[in-house]
Amino acid sequence: MSAKPLHRDTLPQVDGGDAGWLDFSEDASDTVEAAYLKFIEVSAADSAAFTGHGGSAYTVDFNFMAQTNVASRYVRPVRRVPK
């Protein structure tokens, strides 16, 4: 059973280089946004982990607003934009 989607007005994106800013998948977006809201409201965990397209594992660090590919350690900027 999947979690109920969050009702929010922002969307996380990752810097896709030449492809521009790319939206997170719905599941990853829900995971990252829920963790981010806890981070800003109660100074909870400062990162979130999720599985992206193709099964790759990622973490997002909210202090640096950066996404890291767990396997390759490649880091890309992330941002939150209005929907």
Image (cartoon, rainbow, N blue to C red):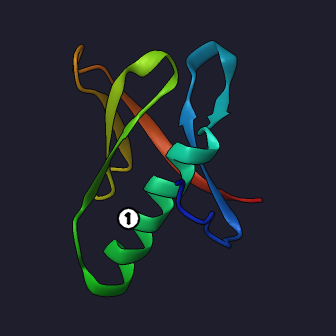
**Can you give x and y, in whole percent of width and height, for residue 30 in the image?**
54, 56
The residue labelled by disc 1 is 35
In the image, 81: left or right of 59?
right
Dot 1: element: helix
Q: Residue at x 38, y 50 (%)?
A: 65
Q: In the figure, 33 relative to 20: above or below?
A: below
Q: Residue at x 37, y 21 (%)?
A: 56
Is 44 in front, or is 1?
A: 1
The residue furthest right is 83
Is 72 in front, or is 17?
A: 72
Which three-letter amino acid code belongs to the residue tagged 1?
A: Ala
**Can you give x and y, in whole percent of width and height, for residue 43 in the image?**
24, 79
Count of labels in the image: 1
Q: In the figure, 64 relative to 17: above or below?
A: below
**Can you give x and y, in whole percent of width and height, for residue 71 in the image?**
22, 17
The residue furthest front is 1
Is 82 in front, or is 69?
A: 69
Q: Residue at x 65, y 33 (%)?
A: 21
In the image, 20: left or right of 54?
right
The quadrant in which the C terminus is found is: bottom right
Q: In the figure, 35 relative to 13: above or below?
A: below
The part of the image, by quadrant, that contains residue 17 is top right
Q: Residue at x 46, y 29 (%)?
A: 52
